[in-house]
Every structure is written in structure tokens, then in C-alpha cells.
Image: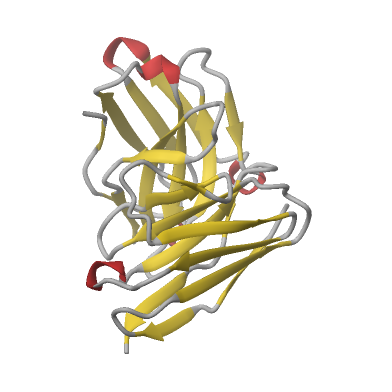
């Protein structure tokens, strides 16, 4: 069965960086895009970026263009999201999600990773 | 960026009720709309994609309609497990979610 397993919760200080992993199983990793979506406490969903595990190509929301980097390691079917220059506004649950290029809806999601930014 | 205005932000209803949630896009997005359900502490789950296609495994009481700028999600007969938060999403130009509709028990 398709699964996206994310790394555990993390606490960071303002100005630091965080790297969240998303390990895929149960399907061909290179056959689907991986998207990253975040959700601040009690708030809605905010799309951040996607990566094509096949080509390594990426696309970032303008808001995060200068602070987020997506990478992948196809040998272990894992995608990574690194967010820099953290502030308290970055405190959120970060989700990875899978999408087919032909449909663009997110059919499987990771369990979410809580990142807390606090001094 | 294309904005998605979702309404209502909260909705009180009873088991068996028919409910409708609306999303309005700030530009023509054809039928590039998806609907998700999210329960507390869980990841969202896709219900409807491409405005009206039911995702495999999703009960048929869920349906979607619309095109252009106006879209609706309808639940024909609410079940206890349907009380959750619902989000629309446009995928026409990058990706944007609506603010969410919290469906609570009356």
C-alpha cells in the first residue's frame, strides 16, 4: 500500500533551518510528484512547493522562493524539504503529498511533521 | 495568484441533512478544483477531483459540481463521520486552497 512516512517533530530557534524528510513506499517513487503543504495551528492549508523525483525539477510558491529547497534521493525513495531563516510564523505542521502529473490532485499524504520555532 | 473564497467558514448541521459548501475562484479555472476532508490531527483526504470526479473509495453521498469560477461540494445525507473540515483547492495556476469550512454537529 502507498505510504509516505515523514520525519518526527522538531523544535528550532528563530533564524535556524529545518529539514523534513518524506519516505515513499508502495509505489514507484519516480512516477509521481511530491508536494509540500503546511498548516499553521488552527489555520488552513498553504501550498509551498513540488519536486519531480524523476527529473529533480522543482517549483516553489513565490512566498517561499528564497527560503525553501526541495531535494530527493531516489536510492531510498525519499524527498526532503529544507526551510531556512525560520521565524515563529513558520510554526506549523508540514505535510508531503503525492500527485500524478496528469491529475494534479494530492491522493496520498504523509502524516505531517510539526515544526515549532521558539526561542 | 488565484484566490479561492470558500463559504461558509463554519456550518452546523444534523445527521441526515443535505449540505452544500461553495468555493469561488478569483479567475476562470475551468474545472481544476479538488475537494479535501480533514479531521483533527490527520492529513487531508481527497474526496473529489477535477470538480466532479469521485475519488475511489469515497462514498457516493459526496458530489462536486461547477466550472469556471463557481464550485460546490454537496453531501447528500450527512453521516456522523462526515463532521470535519473541508477545503477546496485550485490547481489551474500553481495551487491555492480555500480557507476551509468546519462542519459541526447541530
Note whether B56 is above or below A57 in the view shown.
Answer: below
Note whether B92 is above or below A41 in the view shown.
Answer: above
Pick whichever, A70 or A103, lies toward us: A103
Relative to B72, is A2 on the left or the right?
left
Q: Position of residue B24 (x, y in %)?
A: 68, 65
Quadrant of the image containing the C terminus of chain B: bottom left
Tell me the quarter of the picture where residue A104 sits: top right
| Residue at the extreme right of the image, as rendered | B27
Residue ID at (48%, 58%): B63
Q: Where is residue B33 in the image (x, y as percent from the top left)?
A: 59, 50
Relative to B81, is A103 on the left or the right?
right
Residue B61 in view: yes
Residue ID at (53%, 57%): B64
Residue ID at (41%, 52%): B47
Q: Position of residue B40 (x, y in %)?
A: 27, 65
Instruction: Give the colour scheme of this rendering.
Output: secondary structure
Residue ID at (40%, 39%): A107
Q: Where is residue A114 in the image (x, y as percent from the top left)?
A: 29, 53
Pick whichever, B12 or A69, lies toward us: B12
Residue A83 in view: no
| Residue at the extreme top of the image, as rendered | A75
Amino acid at each position: 500500500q502507498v505510504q509516505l512516512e515523514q520525519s518526527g517533530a522538531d523544535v528550532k530557534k528563530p533564524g535556524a533551518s529545518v529539514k523534513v524528510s518524506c519516505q515513499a513506499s508502495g509505489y514507484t517513487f519516480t512516477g509521481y510528484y511530491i508536494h509540500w503543504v503546511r498548516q499553521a495551528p488552527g489555520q488552513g492549508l498553504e501550498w509551498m512547493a513540488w519536486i519531480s523525483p524523476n527529473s529533480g525539477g522543482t517549483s516553489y510558491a513565490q512566498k517561499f522562493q528564497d527560503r525553501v529547497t526541495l531535494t530527493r534521493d531516489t536510492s531510498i525513495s525519499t524527498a526532503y524539504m529544507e526551510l531556512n531563516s525560520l521565524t515563529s510564523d513558520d510554526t506549523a505542521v508540514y505535510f508531503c503529498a503525492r500527485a500524478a502529473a496528469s491529475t494534479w490532485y494530492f491522493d496520498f499524504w504523509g502524516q505531517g511533521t510539526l515544526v515549532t520555532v521558539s526561542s | 495568484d488565484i484566490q479561492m473564497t470558500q463559504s461558509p467558514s463554519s456550518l452546523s448541521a444534523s445527521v441526515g441533512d443535505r449540505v452544500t459548501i461553495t468555493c469561488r475562484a478569483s479567475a476562470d479555472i475551468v474545472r481544476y478544483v479538488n475537494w479535501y476532508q480533514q479531521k483533527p490531527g490527520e492529513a487531508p483526504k481527497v474526496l473529489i477531483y477535477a470538480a466532479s470526479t469521485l475519488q475511489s473509495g469515497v462514498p457516493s453521498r459526496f458530489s462536486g459540481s461547477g466550472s469556471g469560477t463557481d464550485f460546490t461540494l454537496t453531501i447528500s445525507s450527512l453521516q456522523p463521520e462526515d463532521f470535519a473540515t473541508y477545503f477546496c483547492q485550485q490547481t489551474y495556476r500553481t495551487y491555492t486552497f480555500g480557507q476551509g469550512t468546519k462542519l459541526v454537529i447541530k
